[in-house]
Amino acid sequence: MTTTDEIDSTVFEEAVTSTDPKVLAKVWGFGGMTSVLLGAIAGLLVGFERLDLTSADLLGSADEVFQFWSAHRVALVLLGVLPALMTLATTVVPRQCGANTLIFPRAAALACWTWLVGAVLTIVGFLADGGLGTPGAGGQRQATALTLIGLLLAIAGLLTATVCVVTTIISGRSTGTGLRDLPFTSWTTLVSATIWGGMLPVLAANIVLTYVDLRGRSAVRFGAEDAIWEQLSWMFTHPAVYVLALPVLGIALDVLSATTGTTQANRDVLLVATAAFGFLSFGAYAQPFFDTPGTPVMEEALYVVMAFAIVPVALVILGGVADTLRRGASNLGTRPPAETVCALLSVMLIVAGTAVGALRVIAPLDLLGTSVTGAQFTLVVGGAVLGVGAGFQHWGDDLVGGPGARPGMNLLGGLALAGGVVLIGATDLISGLLGLSDFTGVDLATAGYPGSGVDGLNIVSIVGSLALVGGLVIWQASGILHLTAAKKASSV
């Protein structure tokens, strides 16, 4: 008979093999917010390059500028905000539904680590001169293929996690709890997960087509370096980008209700409005790469109508937020909690983003290819990041397993982030109205107007980018301090 000595498992082994939602939430949360920070830094570098569009002094070439520009958007959406939202979806949502844990816990763990591996491969692909193609075909094909594989893994992880979350909400609710009774965070998570459950497979199909063609002897169409981004760009603009905002609107409604001690009036109206917001966020059809000659999808009636229709829906939700604040303002005191301020600012930024999106599709203004697209992206995604931060602050003790929050740091970081988003969004909006292209490259001729490379607006945008990065760094530091304090408290 033989015996083996028991070996204590390491922290890493426990984390990798764990199905505890709190462990998975930490991976989703810190991984997602780190990606948001990296995306913000990439945007900052592109901003510095835009100060002088006559040459690529900082990044080396127009192709490298494009790689960082596209990495900025990919990191914020697929590697940043969506995973960060999964933090709350795996911990807060089951508890709100009355479930003990996520249904299919092993699948949820697999989803988390699959996404993380995909995110790392995607980042490595960008840094290895790959990314999502380049206008001048100056990237490395192998690195581009690695980026595409990484994105496929990240999408696979997000989709698997989505199935677990939706199944938990539908089948794991406590007896007597109907969908209409769900808190807004769970309700908007259900609606948005249904939408991105329909969009992400389409995005994955685009990537598969691109990868197969890229890996052939010579790219025929889909894998051509100057065509890759166009096939995937629909995920980062109207209407698809709004799907990031929907769960944040639910988070804001729940946070404000809890901090003000009031319940929303006209709850059914808000349920319908948030559902409509989700319906109007479906954007898999809006793919300019597959335009029929003479009928560009971004000029078709459906695309334009949805851009305008989402604005009054967003205003209805903002009205619900304002009414909750009005009725519960006396309970906030003279110093509102940091999560209340961040939640309110997030809703306001998202509503502003929908207004910019409507302005963008007005045909006579001819803004579809201008930096107004970037302004809309910045406002909506920036609002989503603020809302996720508000959720982390509100449920922070549950997420990290103990007390230790830094409300002062959270408020400072949130204000810096919001200020940065406003500066970047406003300057991109004004520059777009003046003719600045969405991607400027390093060529004044393609930038849109002669003074774009040295215009003072770009300096203001740099200030905004610095504030944005600074706010995210403060939040990261606050999160690490909170986690450290919680561990010390649990060991005492």
Image: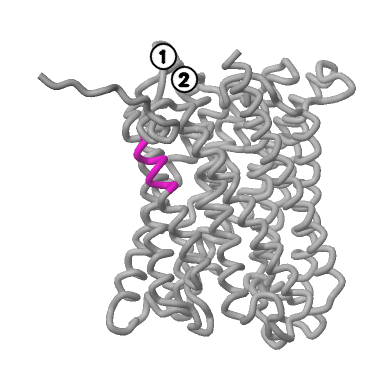
- Locate residue 336, reporting x and y percent: 82, 25
- Residue drawn at (28%, 78%) of the image: 216
Q: Quadrant of residue 111?
A: top left
- Residue drawn at (79%, 19%) of the image: 328
- Locate residue 419, reporting x and y percent: 81, 49
Mark 1 and mark 2 residues within 8 Å of each other at the beta carbon: yes
User: Most extreme residue toward the right, as rendered?
Assistant: 334
User: Most extreme residue toward the left, as rendered?
Assistant: 1
Query: Would residue 288 be seen by someone viewing this image from the given angle?
Result: no
Q: Which one is nearer the viewer's eye here, 255 or 29?
A: 29
Q: Is residue 109 magenta?
A: yes
Q: Is residue 331 magenta?
A: no
Residue at which label 1 appears: 174
Q: Which one is nearer the viewer's eye here, 252 or 361?
A: 252
Q: Which one is nearer the viewer's eye here, 390 or 67?
A: 67
Mark 1, Cα crowd under 10 Å, few <14 / some 14-19 / many 20+, is: some
Q: Eyeballing the image, is 411 above or below 437?
A: above
Dominant SS of magenta comes to helix
- Residue drawn at (36%, 49%) of the image: 156
The magenta segment is: 108-116
- Residue drawn at (67%, 18%) of the image: 263
Q: Quadrant of residue 264?
A: top right
- Residue type at mark 1: give it: Ser
Q: Secondary structure at mark 1?
A: loop
Residue at which label 2 appears: 97
Q: Which one is nearer the viewer's eye here, 339 or 324?
A: 339
Q: Quadrant of the N terminus?
A: top left
- Residue type at mark 2: give it: Cys
Q: Eyeballing the image, is 242 above or below 9?
A: below
